[in-house]
Amino acid sequence: TSLFAAVEMAPRDPILGLNEQFNADTNPNKVNLGVGVYFDENGKLPLLKCVAQAEKQMMEAPTARGYLPIDGIAAYDKAVQGLVFGADSAAVKEGRVATVQGIGGTGGLKIGADFLKRLNPNAKVLISDPSWENHRALFTNAGFTVDTYPYYDAAKKGVNFDAMLAGLKAAPAGTVVVLHACCHNPTGYDITPAQWAQVVDAVKAAKLVPFLDMAYQGFGEGIKEDGAVIEQFMAAGLDFFVSTSFSKSFSLYGERVGALSVVCESKDEAARVLSQLKIVIRTNYSNPPTHGAQVVATVLNTPALRTLWEEELAGMRVRIKEMRTLLVEKLKAAGIKQDMSFITSQKGMFSYSGLSKDQMQRLRSEFGIYGVDSGRICVAALNKKNIDAVVSAIAKVS
Ligand code: PMP
């Protein structure tokens, strides 16, 4: 019998599986609101101008592709620190932050997870209920037991903050808490700065290990505004982890550009942590790829390109907000009785629409409108051409 005779078929990724189904659908009016990807007003995946210009600049002075250092391009890591912690961050200046280039935000999370497992093998991990599905899988795969803290309140159409806080306070010391820094995936509901202050206090009092997942910096309210939560953790004097993704903010999904930053108590500690992060990287994939990080570093470190990027990112952010407003208006005009204005209180690419699994399945089979069974739709995939089809379909299943 063959070596692989007993291998079972793994379930397919629910969201990527939806994509395959969408591609096979012959409905000419089909709309894909499943995946977390930003499309422009023409329904196209954008190539940002700042990226194209950086690439042109790079092509004009082509370089050989040697191995990068294990922790990545130094100018890239520095730029990530500037973005995440602010240009004047005292901790960065004091050398207390260890930052490594990662393979997307997922790679940043994975490096952190593997390091944490070696640091504290018996710790548990808490993720929000619900969370990005890969959080559970990734931390489980790193050897952790993963549990949840309360987050979404379906009845209230928001965050059950009291329950969230109680969940955090009840966690044993050393528990790793994965927090969405902004633009919560999948619900779109973020907590307020005042609530963040309470989370910071709770995390500190219970001696938890905060791991902030920052996959959408700039998609909520702005680069600085979305990064303000990091400042709160910093001000509390906590040691914490931040994963960064540039997949969405640079529309560089396929280049896999991300990072992991670990805030430590001292420069000496950061140097030791960095040395361990490098072992994790070395034993997994040796060292990171060059192109995407070089593009991002070029943009972030060239003032004119940086300005252009900030404008283009603002353009994406504003367009998503416009689509939220338009969706609420059009759903109302289509006769939906329920107040749908919660959609405009959500941040980032996603909206928990409140639609049931049954309704989501009908949207798919009867109208070619593809969203996730949980009711999650990607608002960043709506545009003025497809929104009417989406609204009329929702009205018909409501
Ligand atoms: N965290 C969250 C919350 C995400 O939504 C995503 C992307 N879907 C990631 C991390 C991973 O980002 P990347 O594609 O850069 O690995």
Image (cartoon, grey):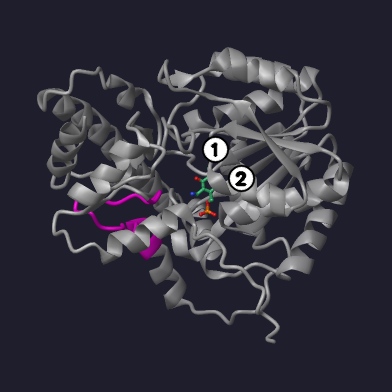
Other-residue count near label 2 (Cα within 10 Å), few / some / many at <14 / 14–19 / ≥20: many
Other-residue count near label 1 (Cα within 10 Å), few / some / many at <14 / 14–19 / ≥20: many
Q: Nearer the viewer, residue 26 or 58?
A: 26
Could you tell whether 261 is left or right of 118 in the image? left
Which of the numbered marks, if any, corresponds to residue 135? Answer: 2
Q: Nearer the viewer, residue 325 or 65?
A: 325
Q: Secondary structure at mark 2?
A: helix
Could you tell whether 338 is left or right of 257 in the image? left
Does the image show residue 77?
no
Residue 186, percent across and down? 46, 37
Q: Secondary structure at mark 1?
A: loop
Is the shortest distance between ligand 1 and the CB of mark 2 under 8 Å?
yes
Is residue 257 on the magenta stretch? no
Residue 65, percent across and down? 60, 79
Q: Which residues lie in the magenta part?
A: 35-52
Is the shortest distance between ligand 1 and the CB of mark 1 under 8 Å?
yes
- Identify residue for label 1: 131
CB contact under 8 Å: marks 1 and 2: yes
Which of the numbered marks, if any, corresponds to residue 323? Answer: none
So how many labels did they put on this image?
A: 2
